[in-house]
């Protein structure tokens, strides 16, 4: 597998170092000639000086045969251009972009970037899953970014408790997929009744998350 990493900051440096140590064929593309000189001394001939947002640079880097292009510069616009060019001009199978501003993550996905990595959103997701007073946590954000799989804890205050699900009016665009009760997995049906302490796994539209949380944990 041939991987091109664009951006020789700390992320690009340690990513390249790890990939080299794992035995992958890697090329790090960096604008700064001094960084390229230093990295070449440390990694060998796996560094190239150039602007990865330019087609000529990607061509010289061998993007046409690359399996993966990873753009981790500090500029979101550059990362977007690099990944789009890699896919559209050179036919790269998979592109990964670092997103510095989490507001741009949706734009990247809509413009065809295969994988986006937002450190801010990763940290926020970690916090959401660890805070004890959060009854609803994100498990997975789906390709359609307005959909998510979430886990919600049912409390005794919920109006859904001890009522058949067939008689419960769930929020719009919410589908209960599974219930975890005392470590056991239950597949909900119309006659299933929720109990306090149940962990519910649901597929939901982002707009319905708050309504679901309120209904399960009032």
Image: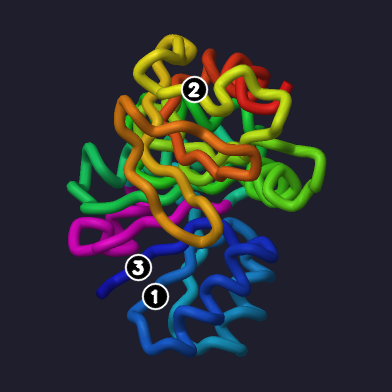
Q: Secondary structure at mark 1?
A: strand
Element on which disc 2 rests: loop
Q: Position of residue 6 (x, y in %)?
A: 49, 57
Q: Look at the numbered discs 1 and 3 and tell me whether their residues touch, using CB distance below 8 Å.
A: yes
Say the numbered circle drawn on residue 3: 3
The location of residue 11, given as percent across then percent down, is: 63, 63
Mark 1, residues whose alpha carbon is within 10 Å: few (<14), some, or many (≥20)? many
Pointer 2: what residue? 163
Crowd class of label 2 (few under 14; some 14 to 19; many from 20; radius 10 Å): some
Tell me where the magenta segment starts and ends, as one range. Answer: 56-72
Identify which residue, 29 or 139, lies in the foreground.
Answer: 139
Point 48% across, 89% down: residue:
21
Q: Which is nearer the N-term, disc 2 or disc 3?
A: 3
Q: Is residue 60 magenta?
A: yes
Report the Cα–Cα distance between label 1 and label 3.
5 Å
Quote the CA–CA distance across marks 1 and 2. Answer: 57 Å
1 vs 2, front mark: 2
Q: Is residue 22 visible?
A: yes
Q: Is 70 placed above or below 131 here?
A: below
Taking the spot 45% from the left edge, 44% from the top edge, the residue there is: 179
Instruction: Work out whether mark 1 precedes mark 3 in sequence or the reverse, and give the earlier one.
Output: 3
- Which label was assigned to residue 167? none
* Residue where numbered disc 1 is placed: 26
Q: Quick check: 69 above or below 86?
A: below
Asked whether residue 109 is drawn in magenta, I would say: no
For the residues bearing labels 2 and 3, Cβ distance under 8 angstroms: no
Q: Residue at x 39, y 33 (%)?
A: 192
The picture places residue 64, in percent across and down from the top left corner, at: 20, 57
| Whether residue 54 can be seen here | no
Report which quarter residue 204 is drawn in: top left
């Amino acid at each position: 597998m041939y991987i091109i990493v664009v951006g020789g900051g700390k992320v690009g440096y340690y990513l390249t170092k790890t990939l080299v140590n794992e035995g992958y064929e890697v090329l790090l593309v960096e604008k700064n000639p001094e960084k390229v000189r230093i990295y070449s001394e440390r990694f060998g001939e796996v560094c190239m000086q150039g602007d990865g947002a330019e087609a000529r640079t990607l061509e010289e880097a061998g993007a046409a045969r690359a399996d993966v292009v990873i753009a981790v510069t500090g500029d979101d616009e550059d990362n977007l251009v690099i990944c789009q060019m890699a896919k559209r001009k050179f036919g790269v199978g998979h592109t990964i972009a670092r997103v510095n501003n989490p507001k741009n993550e949706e734009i990247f996905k809509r413009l065809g970037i295969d994988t986006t990595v937002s450190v801010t959103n990763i940290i926020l997701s970690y916090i959401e899953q660890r805070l004890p007073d959060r009854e609803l946590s994100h498990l997975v954000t789906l390709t359609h970014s307005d959909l998510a799989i979430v886990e919600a804890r049912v409390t005794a205050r919920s109006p859904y408790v001890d009522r058949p699900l067939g008689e419960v009016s769930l929020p719009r665009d919410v589908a209960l997929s599974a219930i975890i009760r005392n470590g056991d997995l239950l597949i909900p049906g119309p006659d299933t009744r929720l109990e306090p302490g149940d962990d519910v796994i649901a597929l939901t539209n982002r707009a319905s998350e708050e309504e679901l949380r309120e209904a399960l944990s009032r």
